Amino acid sequence: MQVVDNVAALREARAALGNVGLVPTMGALHAGHLSLVEHARNDNEHVIATIFVNPTQFGPHEDLAAYPRDLPGDLALLEQAGVSLVFTPTPDLMYPPGYQTYVMVEDVAQGLEGERRPGHFRGVATVVAKLFNLIQPQRAYFGQKDAQQVAVIRRMAHDLNFPLQIMVCPTVREPDGLAMSSRNQYLTQPQRAAASVLYRALQEAGRLYDAGQRHPDILRQAMRSALAGQPLVAQIDYVSVADARTLKEVESTGDAPLLLSLAVEIGRTHLIDNCLLPLALNTPEGLSAALGRP
Ligand code: AMP
């Protein structure tokens, strides 16, 4: 496995590889990231991973400085997972003095996380567009856990004519259902135990849907009451029942797949989770078809 931290070395190393699957990450890797690598390995000759804690996607009051970092540990995991090349740029390399070009995706980046974190998806779309240009992969792999991010990147790739496929991989969970996340490290032990309530809330609404309940407000209410039953949930940021393609809230349900999503604060940690309805859609094929392919 080769590790490069500058553009010339990246371009040279990439040129020596054929078909490439790209897995962009911010490091502090866990089994969720590694499942993206595994999918990428199955579909492509080579996997390129990137590790970059992207400053432009953090708000001024967010956890950029505190974000967990473990480069040696991450590189060991990526090597074991069969990655060919890792790109580890510095913020200065990606955004040198005088940098002033950004990518903004409109509607699909507005609600949910976009509303809670102004500027977040501008940072995400910009860095991912830069990585697509630098690496020119045939496919790029993203996790369902950040479903709105998938929708934003899909839209951006389509609108800007990037010649690649966006692949969506199912959320990898802890045994109690908590979606794996680098930010779970911030949780104290009681908070960690409480955090499984996100998954339970989704499951409860999902079971209602699969049993025939089609009223979005009843699904929203089911998620809210499950979350409200956990005293360590300091704040419910949102619960959402949206059209999986547009991410617009629905007032009635038809045949289109739905995305249930929610976000809470436990202590000062922002946790998100989501699932598609019907629940049977939460597979790589179901996700790739449903999550807003333009
Ligand atoms: P991050 O390092 O948090 O930016 O995540 C890098 C990629 O890994 C993104 O595409 C995430 O959606 C994906 N990812 C993060 N957590 C999980 C998880 N638990 N299961 C599947 N994919 C994940």
Image (cartoon, grey):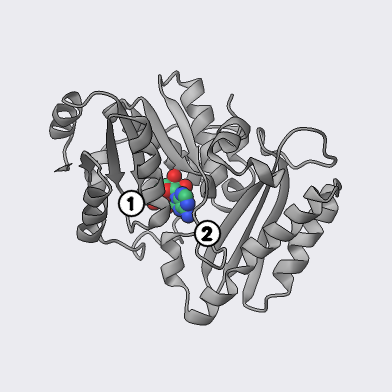
User: From the viewer's perspective, is residue 95 above or below residue 163?
Assistant: below
User: From the viewer's perspective, is residue 292 above or below residue 177?
Assistant: above
In percent of width and height, residue 265 lies at: 58, 67
The residue labelled by disc 2 is: 179
**Label 2 beta carbon within 8 A of ligand 1:** yes
User: In the picture provided, is 157 more to the left or to the right than 255?
Assistant: left
Within 10 Å of disc 2 (Cα), the crowding (few <14, some 14-19, many 20+) is: many
User: From the viewer's perspective, is residue 64 above or below residue 118?
Assistant: below
Q: Amino acid at mark 2?
A: Ala
Residue 283: name its quadrant. top right
Depth order, front residue of 261/130: 261
User: From the viewer's perspective, is residue 203 above or below residue 231?
Assistant: above
In percent of width and height, residue 211 lies at: 83, 51
Q: Secondary structure at mark 1?
A: loop
Q: Amino acid at mark 1?
A: Val
Q: Quadrant of the C terminus?
A: top right
Residue 57 visible in the shown view: no
Q: What residue is shown at x 51% (from left), y 59% (from top)?
A: 173
Depth order, front residue of 254/176: 176
| Disc ID at residue 53 | 1
Q: What residue is shown at x 33% (from left), y 37% (from top)?
A: 41
User: In the picture provided, is 169 more to the left or to the right than 208?
Assistant: left
In percent of width and height, residue 206 lies at: 73, 53
Q: Quadrant of the N terminus?
A: top left
Q: What residue is shown at x 21% (from left), y 55% (from top)?
A: 76
Residue 78 visible in the shown view: yes
| Disc ID at residue 254 | none
